[in-house]
Structures are given as structure tokens and as C-alpha cells.
Amino acid sequence: MKKRIRLISLLLVVILAMTSCKIDREEEGMNTITCKIVGTDKVRYNPGEKASITIEIENLFEKERDIMVVLSANYLSEPVGDEESLKIQVDKQGVQTVTLNWQTPEEDYKGYLLEVRLEDKKGKMLSQDTIGVDVSSSWVKFPRYGYLCDFEEGVDATDKIDRMNRYHINGIEYYDWQYLHHMPVADTVSEDGAGMWQDWAGRSIDGDAILSYIKEAKEKNMVNMAYNMIYAGSDTFFTNRDGKSTKANDWKLYFAEDNDRGSGEFSFHMGTSPNGNGNLFFLNPLNNEWQEYIFDQELKALRTFGFDGWHGDTVGDWGKMTTSEGKPLGFNKAGDPIYLVTDTYTDFLNAAKDALGDYYLSFNPVGAKGIENANVSNSDVLYTEFWPWDKDREDGTYDTYSSLVSEVERTMEDSKNQSFDGKGKSLVVKAYINYEKTNGEMNTPSVLLCDAAVYAAGGSRLELGNGDRMLHKEYYPDDNVLMSEELTERMKRMSDFVVAYENLLRDGQATVENTVEVEEHSYSNTGESDTIWVYSRADADYEIVHFINLLGTDNLWRDEIGKKKTPEKVCNLKVTYYSDSKIKKIFLASPDTEYGASTELKFVSVKDEKGIKYTFEIPSLEYWDMVYMEK
């Protein structure tokens, strides 16, 4: 009898074990399905416009499955609108694509995080993904600049624009698309077709490729900006076909006698040119005849190809200059003579904007030289190419993350009176990080840390474009140092994050001096090497602390050959934060975790002699965590 009972018991155990194994296999099978958001149909939506989201679903299980695809949206931590759902059957071990529509809210200039999740028939989540969506009637408040430089015949414009769309790039700089700096539209362009031409370097430019890019970009609400210098002409501008000097020679800039950086005409030799235009001569931006000429040329270019604006470039500050007659370049409002080209920027840019009318104007004061003058101009978008040896207004160099942050902050403050909402303009930062690399891949830590610093301060970056390439040098066609697969995916997450949280990053926030302390780790509020950089910001509704991880690495943004070390990831970060405000809730969001979604943090508050002390714990810090506190 006892043997029989034991046998029955053993059989029951075996049956239960088999049943358990079957359930486990089924549960395992239910998890072998993934969803990936391929992208949205546009980079920017007008308020109330419908957004189309494309999702790729892959079933790794060996049988067909009925699932529910659910789409939801959040503004920061709060759900927005109703969920959208779609019931579908997925083939066994197959991949299929579905599209869901989301009705954008009517409120202008807002960023959202959309989540797609797959659920089984019991409502269990099987997989998820997220993407950022920008609802803005114009790109100028939240510029996300990219570039194009491949204009060869037969280029796949659709593919390149599609790839850029995934990074939410809403403005494109068309680099060296033009025929010549003083004559951007070539003679070959006519009503019969855009034609072909060679730029100064001999690269073949297909006008139809440019038209294709612009068409594809406009369908995705991207703005197309025609690159050109604001004050340059090449050889054929100064000598006519008979070999005689032209009127343009009277507009040239000359080194002042007490300028030890050069003498005679201010010019650059760019290299051998097949069309004899290898020299670049610079002209006085305040010369009225030059202004009239170049504005007409730019308007011709914009109208001919359908560009949306002019991206003006410079070559930085080269000291005191004079006219061809040895006179000042002009006079300021106080009647004082102007000898520095950087002091011409405000008047030139305002005149350019007046001439362009509804076309956009962006501008690059190279090395941030004269940036204070650009900031108070009527340029729609502010932009600067930084070099680590250039000096700021206090004679400090632009070599650290914090130096970039300071200039982003000052630009926002300088430009408040010229911004349409009074909150200031978001500076687009161009910084060539892995400058000396000639092959291999971009260094992931150096890219992500520079991005984190600039975005946390309220700025933006120009680094991605030409499909999914990344700049590492100032001559864009040399963009042959590629992103790794890891960096490519991280840049998509970064792009989603800065869109979803644009209203906490660059919508009127200001830097504050609230005390932040981190237990058991070195920390700094000035971005020192080998520390956790705690950087505090605030607006009317939120107090924000950015945690940028520099543990085990340095604080220099320039990483010449791509050797910057990956910061040491830390877990269970215990934080103390002091504020005079009563905090209701605390949230954590990061491009590194939880698909960028916000998670609420538990906290304890007590009052002491320093104010109200809030203590909370951050689960992990890899590169960049943002903690925002609702007041």
C-alpha cells in the first residue's frame, strides 16, 4: 500500500513537473516576440495634425499568434489622450509591419513620448518600444540641425532623408552645394532643368539631386537651408573675362596696419581648383553694394531650388580689418568706427533678414567669435562651430564640457528680446569630437557625454546627417568615420529623449545654485573630471537636476583619436537635494534606461538649517540621468 501511494505521488510529481515545464515553455514562447518603432512619417507636426507611427513586429515563436498592438502617449510623466489599439495575427517566425495613427494635441511647442506595446489576449505585455514626437508649428524654437553633402548624380535621396527622419532632424544644412560662393546658382541651371555643375573643388553636383532632397525633406516637415559664406567670393568674382578688375575689388577686406596676423587682402587659398577658383577673398559685410549683391544671389538660389532659408557661415575673428581705402568697415550706433568683422554681424544679419523676408536665416560665428553680436540679431536660429583653443568673453578656452554649457546658457539669455516667446534661442553646437580619426568608428562615450552636456544646458547639436553619418571634421564630405551599431541605436534614443523632454530642456529653464550632494562618489557642480556632474536648472513648474557621469573619464569634449574612456556605471545613487520649494513628486528620465520613459522616485523630505532637504535614490547612472521635481 505504501509503495502504491509512493508510486502515485511520484506520478503526480512527474505530471506536475511536465505541466510546469509546458507552461514555462509557453511563457518563454510568449516572450519571443519583439516590436520596434521604425519611425514617424514626419519630424515635426503642426498642432492637431495626425502622426503616423510605423512598427515592425517579429515573431520568433513557431506558431501564429493573436496579439494587440497598443499605442499611448505621455507628456513628461502624464498620459495624454486615449490609447489606440489594433488587434492583429502575426505569422509564425515572421516579420510584419503595422501603422498606427496618433491625434496630436492642439497645444503648440510640446514634446511627447509615444509608447508602443504588444499584449497577449490576457493583457500581458510582451514587448515595448518608444519614440519622441514634436508638436510645433515652427522649427526655430527647438532646432534639431542635420546636414547633407552628397549631391552626386543618382543619389538615393529618399533613403537618406528617411534615415535622418528617424533622428528627428528638422533642419538641414546643405553644405557646399553651390557653384561658387559669390555665384551659388550655376549658369547650367535653367527653366529646362537643374543641370550639373562642379563646385570649387571639382566635385560634381547634380541639381536634380538637390531638388529630390528638398522634395523628400519637405514631405517630412524638414527645413532646407542653403549653405553659403556671408562675405566671400572666389577668383572669378574679381577679374572679368577680359582680365580686368571688377567692382568687387572695392568691397574687399584688408588687414589693418597694426594687425600682426597678416597684411594686404584678407584671403584664403583653399587648394587647386579645376575652374580656377581656388582662392577665397573676403568682403566687407557692411558694404551696401556687397549686401545688395549677395542678398540678390541668395534669394535667387532659394527661389530656384525651393530652399527654405540661408545658412550663413564665417571663418572666425582675424583681427582688425579696413576697407580697400584703409577706412573703418563702418560705424556703430554710437558713431564709433568698426574695425572687427565680428562687430559687423548684428547689422549685417538684420539687413539679411529684412531682405529674405519669410525665408529663414541661421548663422555661424565660427569659434563663437562675435557670438554676442549674433545673439542679439534677428537670425531665426543661432549656431556656432566651437574649437577648443578659441577664447570666450572671459578669456577662457572652449575646451571642456562646462565651457560649452556656459555659452549655451549665455546665448539663451542674450537672445531673449529677439526670441518670439521671450525665453531665448537654443544654440546649435557644432564640435568636431574625434577630429584626428581617419578610419574605424566614432567613440561612443565622447559623443554621448558631449551631447548630454549641451542638451542639459538647453542647446542642440549638429552632428548627424547625410543619411546616418556623423561629422568628425569641418569638411563634411570627409564624414567617413562611421557610428558603431551601438552608437547608432543610442543616438536614436538620445534623439527621442531630447524631443520628448524638450519642454524641460530648452523652454525657459535657467541654471540655479541649489545644493546637490551624492553619497559615496565624487561629485561636482562644475563638471570636473572623474566626478558625477550635478547640474541644476529650474523653471516655474519644475526643479531639474542633471547627473552627467564623468567618473573614470575626463571633462574635455575634444577626443582627437577616440580614446575617451567609458564612464564607470554606478547603481543605487543616494542623492540629497536642497530647495526652498515644496516638491510634490520626483521623476527620473534618461536616454539610457526604461526606453526614455519617466519613473517616479520615492523621497523623504525634512527641514534643516539649509532649507528643505530631499533625499532619494537613483537606480543607476550610465551616461546621463535627468531628475525633475514637480513643485
Image: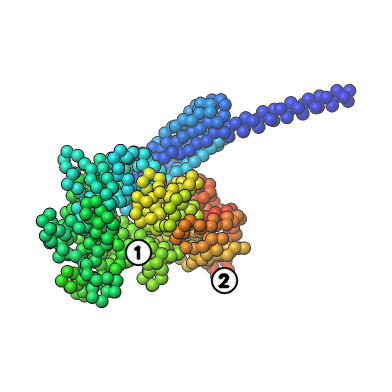
Question: Which amino acid does the dot numbered 1 rest on?
Answer: Gly
- Residue 306 position in % (x across, y down): 23, 45
Question: Which amino acid does the dot numbered 2 rest on?
Answer: Glu
Q: Between label 1 and label 2, give the one nearer the viewer.
A: 1
Question: On screen, 561 above or below 73?
Answer: below
Give the mark, 1 or 2, whose residue is nearer the N terminus: 1
Front residue of this view, candidates 399 and 620: 399
- Residue 475 position in % (x across, y down): 34, 54
Q: Which mark is residue 367?
A: 1
Secondary structure at numbered mark 2: loop
In the displayed structure image, the side of residue 386 where residue 310 appears, left or right: left
Q: Which residue is label 2 attached to? A: 609
- At a point 53% along the width and 37% down the height, the residue shown is 127
Question: On screen, 56 above or below 383?
Answer: above
Secondary structure at numbered mark 1: helix
Question: What crowding class fits label 2: few (fewer than 14 Cα within 10 Å), some (14-19), or many (20 or more)?
Answer: few
Q: Is residue 47 among what the camera can see?
A: no
